[in-house]
Image: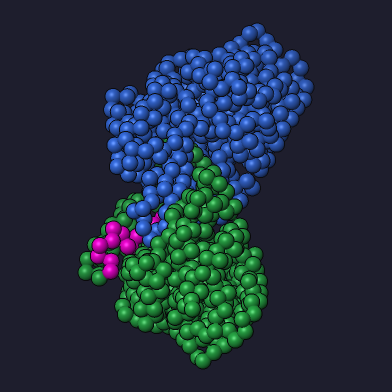
Chain colours: A blue, B green
């Protein structure tokens, strides 16, 4: 008789074409920040059709600041819905599992540099292209189809399972924070972010900033009579690079971080200044992020940056002792986490990975960015496994996910769910309602 | 009997309240680039009412490149009209004069940093505030009211006089270039730009550029896997500052420029890059201007910059030998001029200035920027006098013109016109038609 594992793997293969079509549809929703609702409607319907109890909820911005999982926002959440599909166990109390994914994507960048439109999925050989294909709609679809495969194999999980599809991962983490605060936790969390089929051992804490410089506009015939807000911003960024180099140097002695090039990057994501080619510009704004090591308090890092900018303004003569810089925190302000070695959850994932990778051991690595898994790890002490498919150019041009990898990962997720929650045979052999 | 000079001066005083009201109306027109038409309609009516023959003409963009007075444009000129009001001499062939002013203004910058809305003129004591109040609607109004005063004094000019109101001074100089190319020249040009009641001895040549950097966008978890277009731009600007320092050093030995802090400034007027706070940005654009000394060919300076940027891209490892920078020329590309000492035109202005300034001598100085006067000076070898009122914060916040200064300057312009063109008594003593 075929083993349950083999039946599940066969079911993933059987459903994989449908899975890719599902993913293509999902990529077609331009689920940029505050524009996630249509994608969530699609996911909600998919989960409802599959027999999940679907909860929809928004982040209550008034709660920000009350719970450390929440971060400052600059937008309102009127149309930003989070979803959790929940299926209670049918059996004898296995362990519970939450698949956590985010449906929001970052902007496409220069669309004309894409080989094809970023929100029109395009398959080329073993790759599926599109903004969000890798980060992380492939993972979200994989979690749904991994559970489909178990059902399709005639099996049920013995523990409660959730499919979380949250918003705001790319900016504040407030979607995951809200899910967590509402009690959507489990004995283990698995977040199928794009990890190239590796396990995330640790991530970085991240704070996101907005810098504004105020110049003294003037005519370029006497540039010395004014002070360019753009030049001030460039100068300020130069000073901050000194601070960044100190942070990078601190990686020595950090167990998982010491061999990385720059796990605590200060990156400038956007800049905008001036309004006339031949004026000394009055204002400049730049936004970016700063990484830091797990175990460090995001508020301490924020205070360090604030104090440094105060120092620059008092010591760099370009600022003439004036307060020409406004710093604000406009996105995630969250600690990093370290996944403890040797948890049962990790052992279970290692076993599932080996089963779908010809016995190859699961590698672990550091992903030096914010991850929603941090919410569950830091605030809930829940083993939070981040593990997903091979991708290229996430946040870049021609983002893509590797389909063979996605198939393997979907199998791993299915086997993990089966082994973690436990499975039981469905009583009837009638085909399941869906799919 | 009262002298003609005294009658003219008295007429300027008599009309000055009306002049300020006229100027206030003119400031109210938001005559930004391509939005100058309403202001020009107002000026055209004012000139027509005063008996000028008014010519309206646009720049034919297809002519750009054929005549060295013209510069590259990035906009079309469908609604950008230039005006020349011309009054032929009634008498015995005196010298001709063109008052040259521009009606276009630069954007207001951060409107919320203005004490009052920039396009709503506000009088506070001896100052009139508003974008364009100084640069140079005050001068345009002064040229019209200087001529009104001569008429109001019962006098006529013996030479042909023009009031030019052109567009595009702030960006390409193509308005003045078109007037020049159409033959709107004279024996002398007087341009009442904001000069603090001094004469411009020399100006700077100027070229205006657009720089685009192309990065390799990436996720900030591995910043080293991408290349930030913003960081590349900052780096490129840093390199260009080295070039600027060489140019500044070259001022030693330049007669009028050697004591100036930075007469050949490279200024960045605008910058814009990236589209997401936590991506490594793919693109960045910056625009600015470069000054150079009179006698230098703008095309030579442009070629120098082009070659330098090529060198940077091949030698700075950040560019990895790739052509990641696109440079284009998007505005004025024009030589500077030096006003020869001792012209009759200058002597006449000195005399008029002394007459309205208690005998004080006229100071001359360098204005290190593009001026439309350069078109007439460089290409027509016409004595081009740039002389206008005291202002503050042109191109800045709370731009303003000093009204006492404006009154003095209007008197100087009127006496200059009278002495340069010659005057004659109107035959009838009936009040002139207007005003």
Residue A225 x/y as whole percent: 36, 53
Q: Is residue B208 left or right of residue A27?
A: left
Residue B169 x/y as whole percent: 49, 68
For the residue pair B62 and B326, the one nearer the viewer reads as B62
Residue B261 falls within the magenta-colored stretch = yes
**Quadrant of the drawing holding the N terminus of chain A:** top right
Quarter holding residue B193 = bottom left
Residue A116 x/y as whole percent: 59, 52
Quarter holding residue A259 = top left
For the residue pair A380 and A212, the one nearer the viewer reads as A212
Residue most extreme to the front:
B1
**Quadrant of the drawing holding the C terminus of chain A:** top right
Q: Residue at x 44, y 54 (%)?
A: B393
Can I make out residue B206 in this image?
no
Quarter holding residue A309 = top left
Magenta stretch, main secondary structure, is loop
Q: Residue at x 41, y 21 (%)?
A: A297
Q: Is residue B228 left or right of residue A102?
A: left
In this view, B270 is above or below A266: below
Magenta residues (range):
B256-270
Residue B323 falls within the magenta-colored stretch = no
In this view, B384 is above or below A132: below
For the residue pair B427 and B415, the one nearer the viewer reads as B427
């Amino acid at each position: 008789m075929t083993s349950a594992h083999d039946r599940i793997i066969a079911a993933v293969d059987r459903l994989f074409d449908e899975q890719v079509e599902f993913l293509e549809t999902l990529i077609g929703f331009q689920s940029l920040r505050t524009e996630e609702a249509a994608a969530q409607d699609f996911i909600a319907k998919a989960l409802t059709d599959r027999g999940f109890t679907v909860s929809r909820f928004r982040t209550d911005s008034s709660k920000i600041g009350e719970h450390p999982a929440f971060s400052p926002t600059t937008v309102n959440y009127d149309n930003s819905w989070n979803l959790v599909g929940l299926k209670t166990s049918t059996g004898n109390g296995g362990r519970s599992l939450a698949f956590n994914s985010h449906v929001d994507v970052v902007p496409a960048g220069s669309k004309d540099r894409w080989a094809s439109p970023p929100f029109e999925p395009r398959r080329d050989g073993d790759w599926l292209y599109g903004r969000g294909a890798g980060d992380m709609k492939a993972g979200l679809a994989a979690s749904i189809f991994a559970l489909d495969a178990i059902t399709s194999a005639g099996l049920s999980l013995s523990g409660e399972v959730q499919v979380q599809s949250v918003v705001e991962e790319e900016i504040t983490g407030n979607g995951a924070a809200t899910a967590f605060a509402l009690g959507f936790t489990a004995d283990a969390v698995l977040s199928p972010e794009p990890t190239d089929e590796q396990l995330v051992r640790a991530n970085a804490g991240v704070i996101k900033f907005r810098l504004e410089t105020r110049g003294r506009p003037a005519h370029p015939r006497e540039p010395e009579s004014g002070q360019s807000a753009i030049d001030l911003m460039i100068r300020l960024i130069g000073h901050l690079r000194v601070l960044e180099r100190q942070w990078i140097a601190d990686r020595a002695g950090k167990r998982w971080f010491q061999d990385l090039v720059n796990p605590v990057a200060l990156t400038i994501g956007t800049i905008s200044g001036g309004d006339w080619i031949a004026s000394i510009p009055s204002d400049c704004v730049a936004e970016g992020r700063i990484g830091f090591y797990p175990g460090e308090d995001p508020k301490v890092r924020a205070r360090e940056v604030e104090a440094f900018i105060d120092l620059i303004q008092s010591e760099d003569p370009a600022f003439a002792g004036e307060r020409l810089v406004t710093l604000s925190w406009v996105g995630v302000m969250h600690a990093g986490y370290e996944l403890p070695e040797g948890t049962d959850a990790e052992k279970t994932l290692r076993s599932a990975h080996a089963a779908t990778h010809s016995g190859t051991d699961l590698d672990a690595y550091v992903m030096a960015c914010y991850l929603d898994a941090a919410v569950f790890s830091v605030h809930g002490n829940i083993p939070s496994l981040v593990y997903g498919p091979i991708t290229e150019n996430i946040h870049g041009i021609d983002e893509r996910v590797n389909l063979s990898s996605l198939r393997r990962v979907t199998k791993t997720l299915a086997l993990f769910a089966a082994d973690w929650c436990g499975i039981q045979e469905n009583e009837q052999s009638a085909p399941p309602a869906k799919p």
